[in-house]
Image (cartoon, helix red, strand yellow):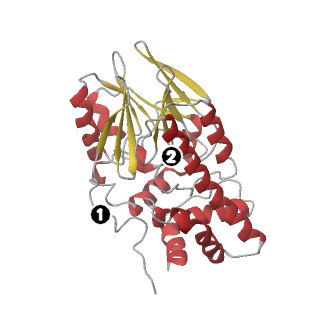
Amino acid sequence: MNTKAFASQADLEEKKISFDKLSDNAWAYTAEGDPNTGIIVGDDAVMIVDATATPVMAQAVIAKVREITDKPIKYVVLTHYHAVRVLGASGYKDEGLQQVIASQDTRDLIVERGQQDMDSEIGRFPRLFNAVESVPGLTWPTLTFQGEMTLWLGKLEVKIKQLGRGHTKGDTIVYLPSQSICFSGDLVEADAACYTGDAYLADWPQTLDNLAALDFQKLVPGRGPALTTPEAVKAGLAYTRDFVSTLYRSAQEAVAQGCDLKAAMAHARKNMDPKFGQVFIYEHCLPFDVTRAFDEASGIRDPRIWTAERDQQMWHALQE
């Protein structure tokens, strides 16, 4: 029997950090397929886009920010509710943090499933939850919006916007209109699997169309390297669309053929492995992805809540 280590429990190797300057105001903190963080430096303050998994992990981001500016880090924006991106927010409170911003949909998801998600993700990613004991609890937004909001960092305009459902129902992008730079969260990935365990797969391609229509010159995806040319942005969008569309189509075919979940997994692998088998966190994501795709193709409109126990049961049923 082929037994794979659960989720990312075997992924213990430190990743190489990249800190890329996109403009005089924007930087990308990326690490070989780990969750990315965006940094926006305005006239009077700094904004962080996605806060890492723990306050201790956030210190590595803060150290990079302090190489470029001593301005207070007043704002943290959460692109969605997943623990691996939000539980580090408290690490910024000694740096001047005033507001944690999220869509109202994201706050609703934290209310509904934040604790289960936190417990579940800590089990999946031990390396990313380094010093998990430093997490004081769930991260709660202090400011929510519906649809779109604008924040001014002095003269720098920052747009925070929902374009539709995809990776979650609360997905939020952050962008600088004057510089055509976007931080997309996990709506877009590059060289990494899309995690779709909480996704709306039927909606995701249209949401990507809405993003493409904004025609950004540079884009920081949720995982993978910063996309620093219009061609790279287009390629990242096309890659993400291909991943979620191939996955959902595979699930629809499996459901139409009367397959059970295990057979749906085998069918998805036939279509997915040749194209995506080599990308970051593919084997971690695929069982969660197929389970959600199978649910949605079977008519379960909203994602079911993952718990640490459900994770383990599903994983061992599909990966062994």
Residue 227 is left or right of residue 88, and the answer is right
Query: In the displayed structure, would residue 134 be above or below residue 289?
Result: above
User: Around disc 2, counting alpha carbons within 10 Å, would you say few (fewer than 14), some (14 to 19), or many (20 or more)?
Assistant: many
The one of 310 and 62 positioned closer to us in this rendering? 62
Residue at figure coordinates x 37%, y 26% from the top left = 23
- Residue marked by disc 2: 186
- Left or right placement of residue 50 versus residue 243 in this view: left
Residue at the extreme front: 231
Q: Residue lying furthest top in this view?
A: 155
Q: Where is residue 196 in the image (x, y as percent from the top left)?
A: 57, 56
User: Which mark is first along the chain, 1 or 2?
Assistant: 1
Residue 208, image quadrant:
top right
Residue 234 seen from this side: yes
Estimate the x, y position of residue 269 in percent, counting from the top left. 58, 71
Residue 86 left/right relative to 113: left
Cα distance in 3D space between marks 2 and 1 = 22 Å
Give the structural element (helix, strand or loop) at label 2.
loop
Name the one closer to the observer, 249 or 90. Answer: 249
Q: Quadrant of residue 210?
A: top right
Residue under the point 27% across and 21% down: 71
Residue 137 - label: none
Tag 1 residue? 12
The image shows residue 192 at horizontal and vertical percentages of 46, 55
Quarter where residue 126 is shown: bottom left
Above or below, comparing residue 134 to residue 124 in the picture: above
Label 1 neighbourhood size at 10 Å, few (<14), some (14-19), many (20+)? few
Q: Please report the residue visible at 62 percent of the width from the left and 58 percent of the height from the top.
A: 304
